[in-house]
Amino acid sequence: MRRFFSFPNPVDEVSARLVAAGVVVMAVALLVTQQWWVLVPLVFGFVARVASGPRWSPLGLLVTRVVRPRLSSTPRPVAGPPKRFAQGIGAVFSITATVLVLAGAIGAALVVLALLLVAAGLESFAGYCLGCKAFALLMRLGVIPESVCEECNDISARLAA
């Protein structure tokens, strides 16, 4: 059961950015068309990636099995726990947007989706992961114990590799 819900560590930064690009595409489609059914694969994808990385996420599988192998760029390993945390934030945002749509608060749902789009866009196009930055801040504040992400605390080991 543990393997079923395991998250990769390290994570390939290139793959993470490609998944974020897929989220950008879905969020833009949602904002432009307001076809609310798109929230279903968006929510499922985030929840699946939090639970087990790309193993059950259609977007994660597309990226890791089809898109990434065709790219010639060198893998860039980064720590998994911050990326999992970021996926969790995406899940919260997409679930919140769904609840707001179901409650008839379309304007509020659009704002939440726009925030999700900004975060995914920063990750995808600039390599700046807001969830990872929040994770690091929570570690510095002692909310997340250092044992969760020893690699996060000592980037020099990763840079040496």
Image: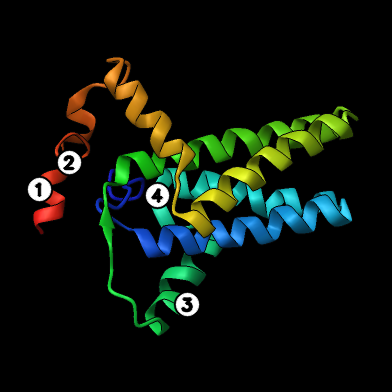
Between discs 4 and 3, the one toward the N terminus: 4
Q: Is residue 120 above or below residue 22?
A: above
Q: Are marks 1 and 2 in contact (CB under 8 Å)?
A: yes
Question: Which residue does the image show at 53% across and 56% down from the upper left?
Answer: 20
Q: Amino acid at mark 1?
A: Ala
Instruction: Estimate how packed mark 2 is, as few (under 14), some (14 to 19) or many (20 or more) residues with alpha carbons within 10 Å.
Output: some
Q: Which residue is mark 3?
A: 67
As drawn, 5 above or below 160: above
- Local crowd at mark 4 within 10 Å, few (<14), some, or many (≥20)? some
Proximity of marks 4 and 3: CB atoms separated by less than 8 Å: no
- Residue at left offset 28%, top offset 43%: 2
| Of marks 1 and 4, the one in the foreground | 1
- Counting residues from the start of the chain, the first of labels 1 and 3 encountered is 3
How did the renderer colour the structure?
rainbow
Which residue is label 1 attached to? 157
Locate residue 113, reporting x and y percent. Answer: 72, 41
Closer to us: mark 1 or mark 3?
1
Q: Nearer the viewer, mark 4 or mark 3?
A: 3
Circle on res. 52: 4
Distance from label 1 to label 3 (Cα)? 29 Å
- Amino acid type at circle 3 is Val
Label 2 or label 3, whichever comes before in sequence order: 3
Label number found at residue 151: 2
The numbered mark, 4 or 2, whose residue comes first in the sequence reads 4
